[in-house]
Image (cartoon, rainbow, N blue to C red):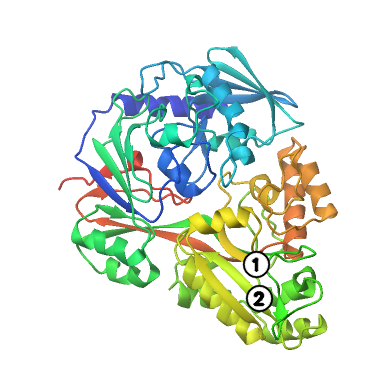
Amino acid sequence: MTKSFLRSAVTALAILAAAPAVYADDLIMGLRAGPDSIDPHWSTLGSQAEALRHIYDTLVDVDENLQLKPGLAVSWEPIDDTTWDFKLREGVKFHDGSDFTAEDAKFSIERIPEVTGPMPMTLYTKYVDSVEVVDDYTLRVHTKGTAPALPNDFTRLFVVPSETGMEARNEEFNSGEVAIGTGPYKFVSWEPKGDLVLDRFDGYWGEQAAWNKVVRREIPDDAARVAALRSGEVDLINYVPASDYLAFQNDSDLETFVSDSVYILNIAPSVKDEEPQPITINGEPVDGNPLQDLRVRKALDLAINRDVLVNVVMEGLGTPANQLMPEGFFGYSDELGKREYDLEQAKALLTEAGYPDGFEIDFTCTNNRVPGDAVICEALAQMWARLGLKVNAQALNGTVFFPAAAREEYTMTMSAWGTLTGEAAYTYGALTHTKDAEKGFGNFNRTGYSNPEFDKVFDEGTQTLDADARRKLYEEASYIAMEDRALIPTIILQTVWAADADKLELTPRVDQETRAYEITPAASE
């Protein structure tokens, strides 16, 4: 972080602090998904983080374009190749009135490996070897080798009081007993799959939120969410379905907000020696796993018409994807061209691989993770049917899908992943690196993919401090994994919010988060 950036950040905060507060009434938001727990270290799911940011702060924050900015840490710098110092914000209070110090940050880092959830947060602490409190407002982090992306990972490091204790689990958080943070809102109550109710924290260190009370209402059904907005039951909804987007745009009572996102729908084919769900021909299991053959994976890829997915299925709300990150991200490879649709070549590859008449395969997706996941799932099944496959597509609620996926029970899946840190280490290290518990890599590798060439190049990148050299290594690793079809990306999603036209103003975020404390009342005319 540069000194000029810090000066700008401090100046901006001073201006905001000097501005008069404008408080509004309640804000009720109808959201497709909510948290699965009030414990901020329970799960990596985006809907979990989005909700709990209101209660807990992270050491490092990001703006609407995922650019790093101060959070509970005001600055950070590497001391040597394996040590980072984080200077912490002074004068911060927890909701119970206690002071935030480096002990709380240290405890929060050390707690993450102790918490067992469906999608472990160790993804964000994989480089941490040990943590040291230098003084009340200086945290020193010793890393496992060089860790140039550590501040990016700490954008998901939620801080709780050290007094919480290692033994605290979901029950204590969900009841509110230990749901104490430093965030702009205080926990009031939560009903799983229902309402998360929050009150503004008037002792918040940053700009005061505009809304006295916020209700985050979980409404997973798209039609029900749209109806709730039209009836006035809620003031704002996220993930407007593509089928309603044009109608919303032409409705003077509603305002729509559109943004590109970092989320990509990826197909994950299991390449294990024995696939979790059998692949069959005429009801009989095939010998071996066809998905281990690169020709089969390429055939699946070539049979996908991404232009149809974007323009017909999603009605224009997306762009075709050719790798696991959007263009411009750190490690995006310009050597990977557009993914072509070529059904005849796909059929030829399938025949060459020994499956001229195709096979039958199960294909499992989410139906409430991101906009369009269920309809994309069905569209892909239909496209592969033209290839000669019989695809048993099933779209499941995330509460069912993600735990089963973590147990590696599916042969081929599709779900969304967003590169929330803006760089390749986050995504490729989690999804395509060989599983390595010691290094913390491959913790979301559900397919069994393992390529020593990829691992070697990627590992070298993680240990390279020079940004240009590290970028080139990540680009090479991206190229290897995508040419291997370790995962098969389909489309990059766009996100649409809609609200009462006279109620509020919202700046869309590329991470799709709906942060009530960044939403302001509509300007009066």
Identified at 21% across, 50% down, the residue is: 503
Identified at 38% across, 56% down, the residue is: 32
> Does residue 70 appear anywhere in the picture?
yes
Q: What residue is pinned by disc 2?
A: 361
Q: Amino acid at mark 2?
A: Ile
- Above/below status of 180 relative to 508: above
Residue 333 rendering spot, x and y as whole percentages:
70, 57
Secondary structure state at the residue bearing disc 1 = strand
Q: Quadrant of residue 143?
A: top right
Tell me the crowding category of disc 2: few under 14, some 14 to 19, or many 20 or more residues within 10 angstroms, Cα based: some
On screen, residue 501 versus residue 75, left or right, reads left
- First in sequence: mark 1 vs mark 2: 2
The Cα–Cα distance between marks 1 and 2, rounded to whole angstroms, is 8 Å
Residue 63 rendering spot, x and y as whole percentages:
46, 41
Residue 250 rendering spot, x and y as whole percentages:
25, 69
Q: Are marks 1 and 2 in contact (CB under 8 Å)?
A: yes
- Comparing 101 with 491, the one in front is 101
Q: What is the residue that sits farthest to the left in this orientation?
A: 525
Q: What residue is pinned by disc 1?
A: 412
On screen, residue 217 versus residue 314, left or right, reads left
- Above/below status of 206 relative to 25: above
Tell me the crowding category of disc 1: few under 14, some 14 to 19, or many 20 or more residues within 10 angstroms, Cα based: many
On screen, residue 50 versus residue 18, left or right, reads right
- Above/below status of 19 relative to 304: above
Q: Amino acid at mark 1?
A: Met
Q: Quadrant of the N terminus?
A: top right
On screen, residue 312 versus residue 435, left or right, reads left
Identified at 72% across, 54% down, the residue is: 432
